[in-house]
């Protein structure tokens, strides 16, 4: 029996080290580019480090990511766009019990990766149909469709593919 105890302790130590390494590797997914953008190494995307900082409807959001945002950063790329719903979902932190998210300027607590700072939790997606567009809610981790003309609390977040 005494010979099994040290073996069990070794196994527990290895498992805890692997768990710690996994969380460190998850944090290494996003690299700060030092120019107002972060690179998502897992998905091959470059994200704006922050949103547009104010209420915006879908058409304004689309124009902001393509024309206004590129002029606010040093790195000049002409292929900025609104993210797809799937891309937005990938930023939501649901499975980390040690991360409570952060409070945005509009008072919502969001669970988005800490590499990206939102000023409110509703972010427009590129997915559209007629007069509606998809929105991802980083407070609740859900998505829905909203009329494109709606603007209160909604934000734009720029993204581009780097693959």
Image (spheres, rainbow, N blue to C red):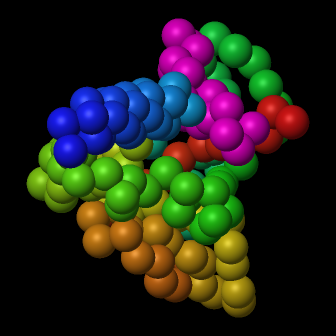
Looking at the picture, tell me which residue is in the foreground, 14 or 128. Answer: 14
The part of the image, by quadrant, that contains residue 98 is: top left
Tell me the quadrant of the picture where the N terminus can be found.
top left
Residue situated furthest right in the rendering: 163
Quick check: 126 above or below 51? below
Q: Is residue 18 magenta?
A: no
Quick check: 82 above or below 159? below
Query: Could you tell me which residue is drawn at 79 percent across and 25 percent down?
Result: 77
The part of the image, by quadrant, that contains residue 108 is: bottom left
Quick check: 133 above or below 62? below
Question: Would residue 99 be visible to someone looking at this image?
Answer: yes
Question: Would residue 152 be visible to someone looking at this image?
Answer: no
Residue situated furthest left in the rendering: 107
Q: Is residue 61 left or right of residue 84?
A: left
Span colored in magenta = 30-49
Please count the marks in the image: 0
């Amino acid at each position: 029996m005494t010979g099994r105890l040290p073996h069990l302790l070794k196994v527990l130590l290895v498992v805890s080290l692997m768990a710690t390494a996994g969380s460190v590797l998850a944090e290494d997914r996003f690299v700060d580019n030092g120019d107002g953008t972060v690179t998502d190494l897992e998905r091959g995307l470059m994200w704006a480090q922050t949103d547009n900082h104010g209420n915006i409807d879908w058409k304004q959001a689309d124009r902001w990511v393509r024309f206004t945002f590129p002029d606010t950063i040093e790195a000049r790329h002409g292929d900025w766009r609104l993210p797809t719903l799937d891309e937005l979902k990938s930023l939501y932190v649901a499975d980390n019990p040690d991360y409570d998210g952060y409070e945005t300027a509009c008072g919502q607590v969001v669970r988005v990766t800490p590499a990206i700072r939102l000023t409110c939790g509703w972010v427009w997606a590129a997915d559209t149909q007629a007069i509606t567009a998809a929105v991802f809610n980083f407070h609740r981790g859900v998505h829905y469709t909203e009329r494109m003309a709606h603007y209160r609390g909604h934000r734009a977040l720029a993204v581009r593919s780097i693959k």
